[in-house]
Amino acid sequence: MEPLLSCRSVTKLYGVVIGVNDLTLELEPGVHGLLGPNGAGKSTLLKLITGQLRPTEGAIRVLGQDPWNNPSLLRRVGYCPEHDAFWKFLSGYQFVATLARLSGLGRAEAARESERALARVGAADYMHRPISSYSKGMRQRTKLAQALVHDPDLLILDEPLSGTDPVGRHELMDLVGELGAEGKSVLVSSHVMHEVQAMTERFLLIFGGRVLAAGDVHEIRALLYDIPHRIRVVCDRPRELAGHLAARPGVDGVSIEGEELRIETREPRDLFALLPEIAQRVGARVRELASEDESLDAVFEYLVGDGR
């Protein structure tokens, strides 16, 4: 199976400003989240992938091919950009149908597939209105429809949820999940971690033009072995439970606040396996048990903060 994306020592310079810095990675087909704060290099990477930019150094391959000046490859790619670039005198339907024709579809097929794509993203009710009358959320749905219309193998979505209302965000997140279940490969960029975490379990974390980590959240967190995991336990006998846990190998610290017990450990799996036995031994009834670090927000904080 050919890689979805392969980058080898890719650097992109804007004069003396570095957009992407010596980036090397390989992604398999599937749905991936591209995460990082604004200015991290996400949009530059997506423009390299979609052939809008050429690397200053290094090599990039998308579906096994160089995307630069490669129309045959770009017909296999759907791109939903972060910023609008509409002909606003057109209706949503006319806009999507025009781009479908530019992607190689015949007139009848473009008409049929444009209606299908617009209906799928929830834009059918207003697709014949001029784009100049659209809200931000309507424009986002229309951009997504034009990315889908030619049935691409790879979808590139740059901040696709920006400007959508809560219902729209939920519907579009569900749509990305459906596309992944249908076998489509999707690379979705965002700076809002919980939204991407709702769409996929595979992530690429980028900061300062460099890839910090790639994999699912558990694999990425496992790379940070030197930083203890923080586990929160709410129970009715926290002091007794803390006394037994503090002496355990792999437990780096225990603190108590009311009925809440916070544990730091480098061996979270062992601790989770032991906790029921220890709680039973001391007669503690555990009401809540959670790892505070099994989220992308915590991982990203570790990678870019003082704990790095």
Image: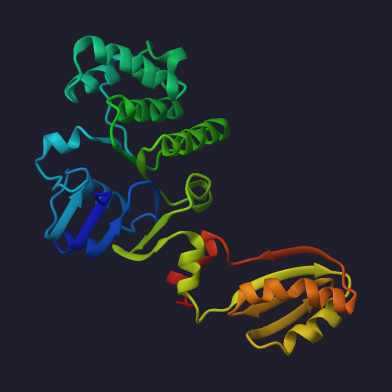
Residue 282 at what x, y percent from top left? 88, 79
Residue 96 at what x, y percent from top left? 29, 20
Residue 207 at what x, y percent from top left? 35, 63
Residue 121 at what x, y percent from top left? 44, 25
Residue at image position (12%, 45%) is 68
Decide if residue 91 is in sight here: no
Q: Using residue 250 as the reference point, say whether residue 56 is left or right of it.
A: left
Residue at image position (47%, 77%) is 306
Q: Above or below — where is 179 with respect to 235?
A: above
Q: Nearer the viewer, residue 54 or 264?
A: 264
What is the residue that sits farthest to the left in this orientation? 69
Q: Nearer the viewer, residue 57 or 166?
A: 57
Decide if residue 156 is in sight here: yes
Disc count in the image? 0
Q: Above or below — where is 4 with respect to 37?
A: above
Which image quarter holds the C terminus? Answer: bottom left
Residue at image position (39%, 27%) is 139
Q: Nearer the viewer, residue 282 or 11?
A: 282
Q: How is the image coloured?
A: rainbow
Picture quadrant where residue 143 is located: top left
